[in-house]
Image (tube, rainbow, N blue to C red):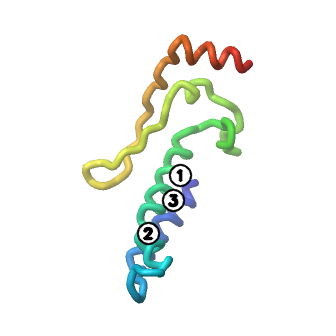
Amino acid sequence: MAAALDGISALRARADQVHVAGNREYNPGWHLALDLPNLLTVSEAVARAGLERRESRGAHFRLDYPDKDEAFGKVNIIIRKGADGSMGIRQDPVPELSREQAQIIEDMK
């Protein structure tokens, strides 16, 4: 994931040089060029969240942390844009389930 962040950074530098010939009508390249910065931002956020979650759970698997960590099962990883434009990461506690939600999960077991 650290290598992915390096790759995303390199792609971001290349994306700054992207230009599309023609206009926006019937030009999928135009729309892709507009979407590219957002796609790179989401990719960076996913990689940073993956680095922060030092465990394996569901589809998120890490060779360096192959087991579940119950502490991570009780937090959400939040990524926000900082004042300097960088991504800030924090862990917020998962809100408690209502009785109705807890009952639904219990009924599914």
Return the residue at label 2: 12
Looking at the image, do the residues carrying marks 3 and 1 touch, with CB atoms under 8 Å apart?
A: yes
The x, y position of residue 18, in whole percent, is: 42, 80
Q: Name the amino acid, label 3.
A: Leu
Q: CA distance from mark 3 to mark 1?
A: 7 Å
Q: Nearer the viewer, residue 72 or 33?
A: 33
In the rendered image, which residue does mark 1 sit on? Answer: 47
* 21 over 77 or under it: above or below: below
The quadrant in which residue 4 appears is bottom right
Q: Position of residue 88 (x, y in %)?
A: 37, 45
Figure check: 45 above or below 22: above
Residue at image location 47% in from the left, 51% down from the top: 45
Q: Amino acid at mark 1?
A: Ala
Mark in front: 3 vs 2:
2
C-alpha gap between disc 1 and disc 2:
14 Å
Give the quarter of the image for residue 36: bottom left
Find the residue positioned furthest to the top: 99
Say few, some or many: other residues with alpha carbon within 10 Å of mark 3 (under 14 / 14 to 19 / 20 or more): some
Image coordinates for residue 7, horizontal then vertical, percent:
53, 66
Q: Is residue 44 left or right of residue 4?
A: left
Secondary element at image label 2: helix
Q: Residue at x 30, y 48 (%)?
A: 82
